[in-house]
Image: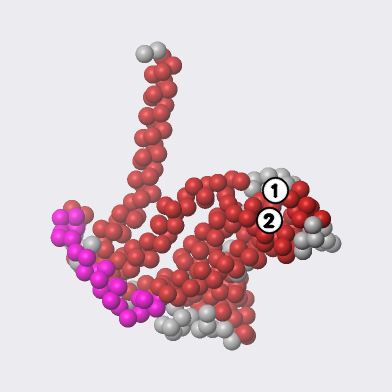
Amino acid sequence: MNHTTLRSRFSAAWRYSFLSAAALLMSFPLLWMLLIALKERPQSYSSFWELLAAPFTLQNFGDILQADTFGRYFLNSLVIALLVTLGNCVFCLTSGYAFARKHFRGRELLFASVLAVMMIPPHVVMIPLYRMMVAFGWINTYQALIFPWLVTPFGVFLLRQYVLSLPRDVEDAARMDGASEWYVVFRIVMPLCKPALTVLALYSFLASWNSFLFPFLFTNDAAHRTLTVGLAAFQSKNTIDWSHLMAGAGISALPVVALFLVFQKQIIQGMTAGAVKE
């Protein structure tokens, strides 16, 4: 074995060791959540080894699934996330296509304002957005949880960059055959934007599914609460029901983990496909 081969194997072993350690570190919160969810009264144990040696139980998951409000919270989160995802795919595609293909007065300034919005923390718009929802009479309604998030600056930027990377020949040929602008967008451009739309759909769904701040502000009754807000009910003023809280969090994390495992290839492809300069 020569020196070059030995050095190459050592480098590969070091990389795999580093990546394995990083994967273990990042998965530790999930493993800890699962461990707490499978124990009864975990706060009563004084050390980690006592907690690990305690008997496992699935009763906590059964209690969560049998709760009257859990199914409503789950359904609310699912419906809201799906509608937000659909709205982002439609409106961000049309907006991104307009910025990429159309020439109109103030286009650069308007697109710069979209990029500027991406740099504004969501907490800055918390009070103005709440007052707007009050003025509209949308507190404790699904409209407050859906309409403000139907289009996002990130989605507009992503689709605009991706459309810029597409050739114009097919669009021009369709127009010469008499195709309308809507036909070009939804029957020609949209299929070509499938990788970017997949990334945007996953991003929008996960952002809506995991959202806590604004659903917490805009809802006061159990009928409109999302799953993240409903899980906060396991925290009282003096105590926290850790076992049931972690069981509920584990169930709520299942769609997120499943989506990532199924679409991880599309996520990587879509995030890198539209990285082009105008």
Amino acid at the residue labelled 1 = Leu
Q: Which residue is at a point 21% across and 69% down the rendered structure image?
A: 59
In the image, residue 264 sits, relative to residue 96, either above or below, namely above
Q: Which residue is at a point 67% across and 60% down the rendered structure image?
A: 187
The label number, if any, that marks residue 166 in the structure image: 1
The label number, if any, that marks residue 189 in the structure image: 2
236 vs 164, left or right, is left
In the image, residue 225 sits, relative to residue 99, either above or below, namely below
Q: Secondary structure at mark 1?
A: loop
- Image coordinates of residue 81 in percent, x first then y, are 50, 69
Is residue 233 visible in the rendered structure shown here? no
205 vs 22, left or right, is right
- Image coordinates of residue 262 in percent, x first then y, are 44, 53
Which quadrant of the structure image shows residue 75? bottom left
**Part of the protein shown in magenta:** 50-73
Q: Please state, as top left, top right, bottom left or bottom right, where the N terminus lies in the image.
A: top left
Q: Earlier in the sequence, mark 2 or mark 1?
A: 1
- Image coordinates of residue 39 in percent, x first then y, are 21, 63
206 vs 71, left or right, is right
Queried whether the magenta region covers residue 111, the answer comes back as no
